[in-house]
Image (cartoon, rainbow, N blue to C red):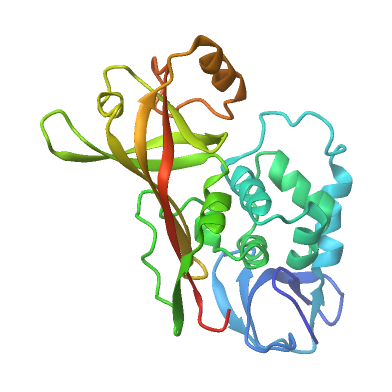
Amino acid sequence: MRAHLGDQLVIESTATGATRRDGEIVGLHHEDGTPPYDVRWSDTDEVTLVFPGPDAHVRHLDTLAARPAEAEPSSTAAPPGGPGDVGRRLAVERQRRGLSLEETARRARMSPAYLAYLEERPGAPTPATLIRLADALGTTATALLGGGMDLPPGQGHALLHPRLRDLDPQECRTLLSTHGVGRIAVSAPDGRPVVVPVNYQVVDGAIVFRTSPRSVTAAAAETEVAFEVDHVDEAMSQGWSVLAVGRATVVTDPTAVHRLTLAAHTTPWAGGEREMWVSIRPTSLTGRRITPADQ
């Protein structure tokens, strides 16, 4: 007997063949998929260690996963209600890692149509399904569920043999060149240092963001500021950071303001009236990355 995570263990009556109990295999103790298994029973939702007897057999995931996909309309149909929180996190994490729907489904041992269903419609995948998807995406089931959203990153264990290396300017520009959230460090009018997160993008080599004319970041215009953006891979205990230093200026040319507004990928998450564009053209660009020592 061999099984994968998410397969179903079925115990039947040896006399009638009727199902007496079934559950989802949520834990393996051998890499080759042989018993024993950790099983979450459908009748009690409890997880127990099971050594299957002659009255048990495994119903494999390939058979189970195809059913929801076949029963659902084409993934091109408009999803009623839109994706759920888990589906949005799945799609964002998959795209961030540059994985296709098909490759992710192959890694998670499920139907691509079923993965599309999870990404596009509200749903509650089973714990085993989340475990497989998290493993395929190099993250954790807790992260896909939104756990730890209010906790700062970096609380996991460090790599056994980490390597900290400096990034060259081209690597820094590449990492900085996308759009997202960065932090700008400025001196407030009262002289105190302040760090503020902003939605930013890079246009023609300059870091640009929108703010309010009454904000601290607007008051820092025509002064030298520091801008930092980073990424932490919590599951792999890896990450990078890029620091740009330069003079902040307010964009006043109407044509330039119009062009930036049209090119904006996102609006400021903070909301409100934030129509002042601030530009930072870096005069210094440095960065560091943490990886395993053998990379």
Q: Nearer the viewer, residue 244 or 238?
A: 244
Judged from this view, the residue extending furthest toward the left is: 190
- Front residue of 28/21: it is 28
Work out whether 258 lies above or below 90. above
Q: Residue at x 44, y 37 (%)?
A: 281
- Say which quadrant the C terminus sits in: bottom right
Percent across and percent down for residue 193 are: 18, 41
Q: Quadrant of the N terminus?
A: bottom right
- What is the quadrant of residue 110 in the picture? bottom right
The picture places residue 64, in percent across and down from the top left corner, at: 82, 61
Q: Whole-percent x and y of residue 199?
A: 45, 34
Depth check, front residue: 63 or 117: 117
Q: Residue at x 59, y 30 (%)?
A: 265
| Location of residue 221 by image quarter | top left
The correct choice, above or below, for 129 with respect to 212 in the image is below
Hey, which residue is sitting farthest top in the picture? 254
197 vs 117, left or right, is left
State the count of labels: 0
Q: Position of residue 113 (x, y in %)?
A: 83, 49
